[in-house]
Amino acid sequence: MSCKLRSGIQPVQNFAVLKKVIALGADKLDWGRKTITEGFKAVENAIKPEWKFSAGDAITVADLCLVPQVYNAKRFGVEMSSFPRISEVAARLEALEEFKAAHPSVQPDAAN
């Protein structure tokens, strides 16, 4: 799961990649939204409804990757209601003090 989040979805949102997308004449928001949506479909299907977190009942590397990816998904306009399991896990994680302190929204160098 963490591999899908950090290798399959996240790299396509790096500024260097987005510059190339723009140079090719594509809309970076549309491209990012489609890429994230496709990746999230696989992640959503992998999260079992009875799990508290992305890969079970304990926090894993997948959860560390999920929160910033959900933040990016919202930036790109991904319709998160299509991903209820991801949304539930992200909300559960974002309620934890450790995740609040590390959330992209409170980082001075995070893209808005």
Image (spheres, rainbow, N blue to C red):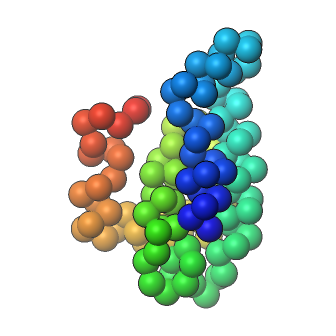
Q: How many marks?
A: 0
Which residue is painted at 51% across and 82% down in the image?
Answer: 52
Residue 51 screen position, x and y as percent: 57, 84
Which residue is painted at 73% across and 14% down in the image?
Answer: 24
Residue 67 screen position, x and y as percent: 45, 58
Figure quadrant of the N terminus: bottom right
Q: Is residue 84 visible?
A: no
> Between residues 103 and 62, which one lies in front from this camera angle?
62
Residue 112 screen position, x and y as percent: 41, 32
Residue 92 screen position, x and y as percent: 43, 72
The relative height of residue 5 versus residue 61 in the rendered view (above or below) is: above
Q: Quadrant of residue 111?
A: top left
Which residue is painted at 25% across and 36% down in the image?
Answer: 108
Which residue is painted at 56% across and 64% down in the image?
Answer: 2
> Between residues 37 and 24, which one lies in front from this camera angle?
24
Q: Is residue 55 visible?
A: yes
